[in-house]
Amino acid sequence: MKRKKIIRYVLLSLLVIAGAVGFYIYKEYNRAHKDTAKLTPDYTVGATDLLKEFENNEQASNKKYWDKVLSVEGMVKEVAKDDRGFYAVILGDTASMSSVRCSIDSAHSNEALSVKRGGTITVKGICSGYNADEMLGSDIILVRSVISQKK
Amino acid sequence: MKNSFFLAATLIFLTTSGFSQKFYTKSGKIDFDATSASSPEKIEGVNRTATCVVDTKTGAIQFAVLMKGFAFERALMEEHFNENYVESHKFPKAEFKGTITNNETVNYSKDGTYSVTVKGKLTLHGETKDVETQGKLVVQGGKVNANASFNVLLSDFKIAIPGLVADKVSKTAKIIVSCSLEPLKG
């Protein structure tokens, strides 16, 4: 009698654990990307300052900024739209070939519509690294970006 | 001796004064597809920030892409891609450096579709391997569209697929490149 009770308890608790694990796996598997608009920036910087930092020390800057949420203020050099309707906002100094290129999160595409060339804006995005290129100009790339402020 | 000096001088003269037209983009698209045949779901990522340069004179072609820039539909898949497979914190960039071996058959100033063979070295996950593929260059209105797709064996680049997901993640990845190149001024 006592033994049966123990077995029943054990089975029941195993079932509960299995259910919880299953639910966790299911949730984790279907987890969506975090909306960048809701993330707090790890660093707030100016586009040209950020470029200078990467130019001076790529390795240290990569260590500091890679995979971090950056809020970058700069002048809009260009707003590019590709054939699939994805936007990229390019920040920096027009006199320089180097820029901070921000791929706009497709859920926030409409925010890019009102961005004007020559205006100063703040873009929040996740730093995916630095592409050094002497001929084409070096770029810092932000992915899943959102426009956080217009001036 | 005199002859070779003359030849070298001519070569230097040609390379410095010769008209060299380059086409480039910084928003090239690269798809990565490692869906195995038996997988119920797609394992694919897309990167829209690839840099590509083509030198029309020499046929030299280069790509650079940041691994962290690959977007996957599922957050978990993207994290696994970055953390477990390509280890993008250690190897943030993938590069291809090669040449269009039949570059002389492409007339970059005449609209048309040209089939090309590209041969070169692909560096991914810190490993460099020779890659050869067929591609297409479409010259239209002073711009060049470059398209190619090829398969890489992930183990060639020391990317291990854990047994648990072996039925979903293929041992080879299909890389699809599509770039719209513009002439480089200056």
Image (spheres, helix red, strand yellow):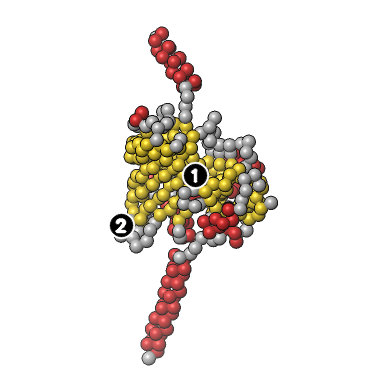
Identify which residue is drawn at 38% across, 47% down.
B175
Look at 38% across and 83% down and name the residue there: A7
When the figure is inspected, residue B41 is found, relative to residue A133, above or below; the finding is: below
Q: Which is more toward the observer, B96 or A60?
A: B96
For badge 1, the amino acid type reads: Ser
Chain bearing tag 2 is B
Whether residue A143 sits left or right of residue B139 in the image: it is right
Work out which quarter of the rendered image holds the C terminus of chain B and state it: top right
* Residue furthest to the bottom: A1
Can you tell which quarter of the image residue B6 is in? top left
Nearer-N-terminus badge (2/1): 1
Mark 1 neighbour class, 10 Å CA radius: few under 14, some 14 to 19, many 20 or more: many
- The secondary element bearing badge 1 is classed as strand
Mark sitting on residue A136? none
Q: Position of residue B114 (x, y in %)?
A: 35, 36
* 3D distance between C-alphas at marks 2 and 1: 30 Å
Q: Which residue is mark 1?
A: B27
A135 or A5: nearer the eye?
A: A135
Indicate left or right for B31 with A94 as reference. Answer: left
**Residue B43 visible to the viewer:** yes
Q: Nearer the viewer, mark 2 or mark 1?
A: 1
Say if A44 sits above or below B110 in the image: below
Count of labels shown? 2
> Which of the labelled discs sits on residue B37, or is there none?
2
How far across and how far down the image is residue A114, in percent?
61, 53
Q: Residue furthest right?
A: A151
Instruction: Examine the rendering and report whether any part of residue A53 can be seen.
Output: no
Residue B133 screen position, x and y as percent: 33, 40
